[in-house]
Image (cartoon, rainbow, N blue to C red):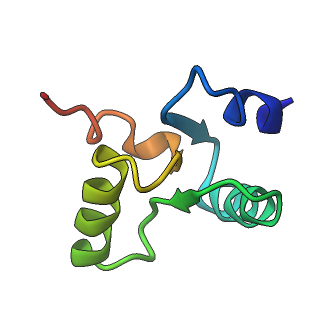
């Protein structure tokens, strides 16, 4: 079901929140295998990597951003 939503041309990008870092990483692997341009945002990344990931998501180079629920408040930004 998630794959169908992500492949819908009506969506340019999407953020999916997951219950844990481990689930976020697994979902990232599964989506990449399915051909989705996804990236996981989590605490194992260096700050520089997280900033680059956010730039790539904002510029639509990444279709799907996967994030543990812990980070949901930190990801709110103004356009």
Residue 12 percent across, percent down from the top left:
49, 32
Instruction: Write down the quadrant of residue 61 in the picture.
Output: bottom left
Residue 49 percent across, percent down from the top left:
31, 75
Left or right: where 6 falls relative to 57? right
Residue 27 higher or lower than 73, as above or below: below
Name the residue rendered at 29%, 49% in the picture.
59
Split into 4 quadrants, where in the image is the C terminus?
top left
Residue 13 percent across, percent down from the top left:
48, 36
Q: Which residue lies most toward the top here? A: 10
Name the residue rendered at 46%, 63% in the picture.
42
Name the residue rendered at 81%, 31% in the picture.
4
Instruction: Write down the quadrant of residue 74 in the picture.
Output: top left
Left or right: where 70 falls relative to 40? left
Q: Which residue lies most toward the right here? A: 1
Residue 15 higher or lower than 56, as above or below: above
Left or right: where 46 falls relative to 15? left
Residue 1 higher or lower than 24, as above or below: above
Residue 70 higher or lower than 50, as above or below: above
Residue 9 percent across, percent down from the top left:
62, 27
Q: Nearer the viewer, residue 24 or 31?
A: 31
Name the residue rendered at 38%, 47% in the picture.
60
């Amino acid at each position: 079901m998630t794959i169908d939503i992500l492949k819908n041309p009506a969506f340019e990008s999407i953020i999916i929140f997951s219950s844990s870092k481990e689930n976020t990483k697994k979902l990232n692997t599964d989506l990449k295998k399915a051909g989705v341009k996804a990236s996981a945002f989590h605490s194992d990344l260096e700050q520089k990597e997280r900033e680059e990931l956010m730039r790539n998501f904002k510029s639509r180079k990444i279709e799907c951003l996967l994030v543990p629920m812990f980070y949901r408040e930190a990801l709110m930004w103004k356009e």
